Amino acid sequence: MQRMISQFQIVTKLVILFLFLSSGLWATTVAQYEIADIVLEGGTYSNPYTQVDLAIEFTTPGGSTFALNGFWDGDSTWIIRFTPTIVGDWSYTTTSNDTKLNGLTGTITCTSSSYHGFLQKSGLFFQYENGSHCFRMGDTCWRMFRSKNAAFETHFKPLVNARANQGFNYICGSIYHLGDPNINEGGNLWYDDSNLDSLQTGYFTWVDKRMDYLRSKDFIVGLYLTWAQNFVLFSQEQFERFTKYVIARYAAYNVVWVISGEYSEVGQPSDYGYFGSVIEANDPYNHLISIHPSGNESNSQDFGVFSPWLSFIMQQYFGTPDYLGQTITNDRNRGIPVCNDEFGYEGPTDTGNPFYF
């Protein structure tokens, strides 16, 4: 099937460098579903990641409110990453405990585009916001945000190009992965790869590059926050802060949130269940949410814990096509989509191979 990419889809992100006025900020124009970065300058802090909060409330063209958080991007730079979903004027006001970031106002005018919108569910199926059907054809690159396993130019881009040419529209990976240090072209995710209160923004600069490239190829991205063995290293406060940061940075993309990989290996379902509600409360785009089980399991076994926020059931089963088809059928009685997101692998199996992912 021939893939058609509009001019909008080629443009990855609009960075808005605002000039300050006594009355607020300059207005600007953004196409519908185009990503706009509102770049702001805050004060100086020893650890802005833990010390500063930044939120923005939009009034939509229809008069409703739409709230999201900003994120720290190194030094005293803060970004509000926004994707307008409705054509018209979006006015806004910022709120922050940093006086330089508090009480800023402005307007963004959203113009029409032909983009199909974010992924949604419709009963047992997936669709885009414009109502068009989506057959989710996916691949996995668990370590796609790390340079050791998926160097941007030599491995990541060729992989994405190949999958796009094959008709894939979904790829998933983990931002904070189990195993070797989480490091990419921008450095470590955490200071010393261990201080969960000291996030390093250089790492996310290169996550951004990968997300932008995936967006340019019209991929939906399954963003795993972490792996079960990493999850239990966080306090609740630390993981909630990390979750909110990732949402603030990537909710403007066409993403699916996955709280943890192989959650049933470590911890209790209730330990993870809380964070589904955290995602719901902080993602104004209402992206789909799920959680990844261990081998030969389905998260439907904990449906009672996850059902308030679970958008689709995720399985990890291995076997014949008939067996796998039956497992899907068995879980469809929950009334939401069912996906087997891990049933086999190809490529290098040696964990020492830099292309093992």
Image: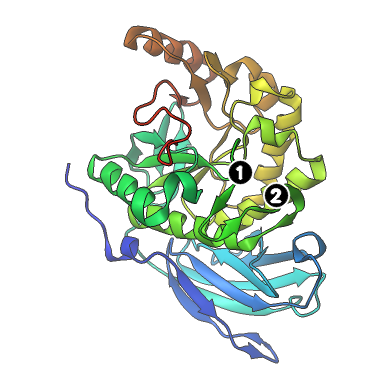
Marked residue nearer the N-terminal end (1 or 2) = 1
Disc assigned to residue 242: 2
Position of the C terminus by quadrant: top left
Q: Is residue 336 above or below residue 134?
A: above
Position of the N terminus by quadrant: top left
Q: Nearer the viewer, mark 1 or mark 2?
A: 1
Of the pair 59 and 288, the residue shown nearer to us = 288
Q: Kindly identify the residue that appears in the image at 22 percent across and 53 percent down.
A: 4
* Residue 49 percent across, percent down from the top left: 75, 61
* Residue 174 percent across, percent down from the top left: 54, 41
* Residue 122 percent across, percent down from the top left: 45, 33
Question: Which residue ends up furthest to the front in the rendered image?
Answer: 352
Contact, CB < 8 Å: mark 1 with mark 2?
Answer: yes
Determine the CA span between mark 1 and mark 2. Answer: 10 Å
Is disc 1 placed on a helix, strand or loop? loop
* Residue 132 percent across, percent down from the top left: 33, 43
Inspect this view and state whether residue 218 appears. Answer: no
Q: How is the image coloured?
A: rainbow
Residue at image mark 1: 176
Q: Kindly identify the residue that appears in the image at 67 percent across and 37 percent down.
A: 276
Circle 2: residue type: Phe
Q: Is residue 144 above or below residue 113?
A: above
Disc assigned to residue 249: none
Left or right: 194, with 222 as reference point: right
Q: Kindly identify the residue that appears in the image at 51 percent across and 48 percent down.
A: 146
Q: Kindly identify the residue that appears in the image at 70 percent across and 75 percent down.
A: 76
Is disc 2 placed on a helix, strand or loop? helix
Q: Which of the 4 image quadrants contains residue 265?
A: top right
How many residues crowd around disc 1 within 10 Å: few (fewer than 14), some, or many (20 or more)? many
